[in-house]
Image: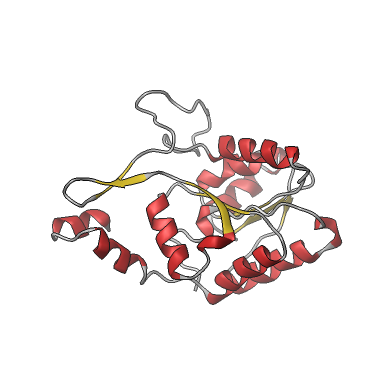
Amino acid sequence: MMEEIHLKGGKVEDIVECLKTLPLSAHIVSAIKSAHALGCDLKIVSDANVFFIETILKHHGILDCFSEICSNPCFTDKEGKLRILPYHDFASSLHGCVRDTCSLNMCKGQVIERMKAAALAEGKKRFIYLGDGQGDFCAILKLGDDDFAMPRKDYRLWQLIYKNQILIKAKIREWNDGDELQKVLLCLINSSNFDGGSGLVSATLIHGNTNFQ
């Protein structure tokens, strides 16, 4: 999308307008607002980029619901074009993860390990991780017995989880669409088993290539 806009002489402002047209289910927006209101610490771990994510979240009025966005950084060059840099700079050193489900520029498992360590230091013990892509699999493997993994049914992450169940410690709660995601997520947050937990929402919740209609 970005390259096509640049080839046509478009600028960053044109990319913003294009991003605003991407669909995001009202159920997803409502679930995010509700989870935030209930005290969950919402974070995004995405192999997209910070500019895309922040633009979409801001457009839907939910940017302030998230305390952290871990994604590929961006900058605008002298020609007014948006340039994306890798989260893990693989040109200088690899992130070291041996799983072929992780991309060169981001190992979500390593990001989750850091987040979990910080959360535990603050007394937060439970995580909910939502995702659908194969890049989310390494992150799921870092979850513990008290955590929840919410893969989208029949998508790549869901397939990997059910092919490798012996490796998974987290409890699995699948979902099909925005409506079901909202119901499952809020049920977990409101349950006594999740009292005082830390909610972690993955980049695929709002990823531009995912249609949550």
Quadrant for the N terminus in the image: bottom left
Which quadrant of the view contains residue 84? top left
| Res 208 visible | no
Q: Between 22 and 209, which is closer to the camera in this rendering?
A: 22
Residue, far top: 93
Instruction: Determine the residue positioned at 37% across, 69% down.
Output: 20
Looking at the picture, how far across and down is residue 88, in whole percent? 44, 33
Q: Between 111 and 147, which is closer to the camera in this rendering?
A: 111
Instruction: Determine the residue positioned at 44% across, 57% down.
Output: 53
Which quadrant of the view contains residue 58? bottom left
Image mark count: 0
Looking at the picture, how far across and down is residue 133, in whole percent? 51, 51
| Res 84 visible | yes
Residue, far right: 192
Q: Between 144 and 154, which is closer to the camera in this rendering?
A: 144
From this view, report whether residue 141 is shown above or below residue 25. above
From this view, report whether residue 70 is shown above or below residue 209. above
Q: State left or right for residue 138 relative to residue 106.
A: right
